[in-house]
Amino acid sequence: MNLAQNLERSAFFFPSRPAIRQGGLELTYAQLNDQANRIATGLISLGIRPGEHVGLCSLNSADWVAFYFGALKAGAVAVTLSGLLTGDELTLLVNHAKPRVMFTTENKLPEMERLKGQAGLEKVICPGGDMDLAHLAALGSGSFEAIDRNRADIGAILFTGGTTGIPKGAMLTHEGMNFSSWSIAYYERSSENDVGLCFLPFNHVFGQMHIMNGTIFSAGCLELLPAFDMDKALELVEAGRITKFFAVPTVYIRLLSLPDLEKRLGKLRYCFSAAASMAMEIVKQWKERTGITIAESFGQTECMPITFNHYYPERHVVGSVGHPVHGVEVQIRDLSGKLVKQGQEGEICMRGRNVMKAYLNNPEGTRDAFWEGEWLRSGDIGVFDRDGYVYIVDRLKDLIITGGENVYPREVEEQLYASPDVEECAVIGLPDKEWGERVVAYIVPKAGRTVVPENVKAFLKGKLSPFKVPKKYEIVSDLPKSPQGKILKRELKKQLGQK
């Protein structure tokens, strides 16, 4: 079994159909499969062996897709890193995953060159690097079949972040990723005639598993944008090029502000939202104005999808994340791990073929993530209704989701503490109509120091991805604490909410 066999099957049945469109570029399935073959055999010629790590660190592109499937075909493990990573973040994850080869972009070359040798990194594939992608492909052959792997072997590692400074790399198996791809194609009733618009990053489970792998499985076409551009996205939709639209709630909110939205949908048949909770009012407004239901699901990097809302559009329930998908078991447990009764709230736990194998080099984190070693703990509070629909109530952790991106407060706090002006700090997420949540930092200055928000923001920009940098700063003289000295973030949320 090898996830890349999905590409091979689609290329066999639909060789001349478009697989990827990006700007003026169009690759058919035959061309994409040929390029992936050449990259796979090129990697093998460099000495890459099955099970070894190969990294990708760039924005979405046709080359990204070809390299990803080339790595999988060679039997390697694709370590997918955000193209926005810089500095300490990038160093941390490269050192943690230790890829032998890295596909990246020219602007990241200085950092990658610095990392060569110290993290097991041997070759950097980009213009100006050890070789560019064309050179790598020239080393290989267009005639190749994906190396067979055990269904339990790791195919990809996706990072979820971490609240303790230790990265969590979810190790996804070939069987699990195949199951996820099938599930998405099934629940979306996908076909080779579909064209899905993708501007969400491929390092994220939404972009990589749901959109990219779901589309390749069903032999549809991926229309790529490097990032969300409302004018460009609307141009593509209005021209009738897109049948499936994938976005986070922020995008739907922005689109609803357009007075002529209804006239600009072209051949759009399907809309999907994930990565953050969608407000019920937005779902209702979208349906009223466009006639299209926004489908949703519940999933996470460690297991995707878990639920889906809904295969039967007439059974879609606004506010729910739907029913558990076929083949995935879902339970609601209390914090001691005991099952709760139907209608009672508790932690959502799941078991299925698409559950991750473990966290990379993190046995303690892996143990904490499971009950009985097989029921994955989601960290989310949920409840079943009498009809089997799942509802998300709240999160157990302090995870902030802003614009569909995950932000772990501790990671931001650690960077704030590196500032010579900061005595204490706490980072929280507050509700925001457009972004879902906005990142807010509370800062206590050191004695005799002055904290200027714009200076702090400039300090953080070189250390964190842009979406992690707080949008608001509250300078205070002290922070509320428990008798044990723990900062009470819930009190901070109340205080800011009252302003």
Image (spheres, rainbow, N blue to C red):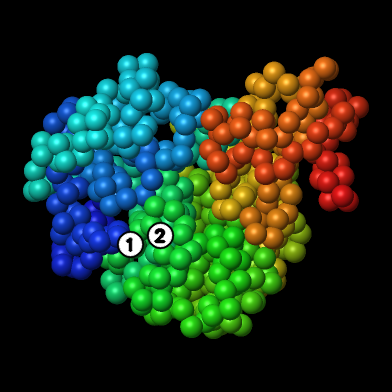
The local secondary structure at tag 2 comes to: strand
Closest to the observer: 207 or 285?
Answer: 285
Left or right: where 300 falls relative to 217: right
Contact, mark 1 vs mark 2 (Cβ under 8 Å): yes
Q: Residue at x 8, y 43 (%)?
A: 141
The answer to whether one can see residue 366 in this image is: no
| Disc 2: which residue | 198
Q: Position of residue 339 (x, y in %)?
A: 70, 52
Closest to the observer: 374 or 127?
Answer: 127
| Disc 1: which residue | 222
Q: Residue at x 59, y 72 (%)?
A: 256
Q: Quadrant of residue 321?
A: bottom right
User: As shown in the figure, which amino acid type bears the numbered disc 2?
Assistant: Cys
The local secondary structure at tag 1 comes to: strand
Within-10-Å neighbours for mark 2: few <14, some 14–19, many 20+: many
User: As shown in the figure, which amino acid type bears the numbered disc 1?
Assistant: Leu
Closest to the observer: 18 or 471?
Answer: 471
Q: Label 1, label 2: how many angstroms apart (C-alpha)?
A: 7 Å
Callout count: 2
Left or right: where 416 falls relative to 208: right
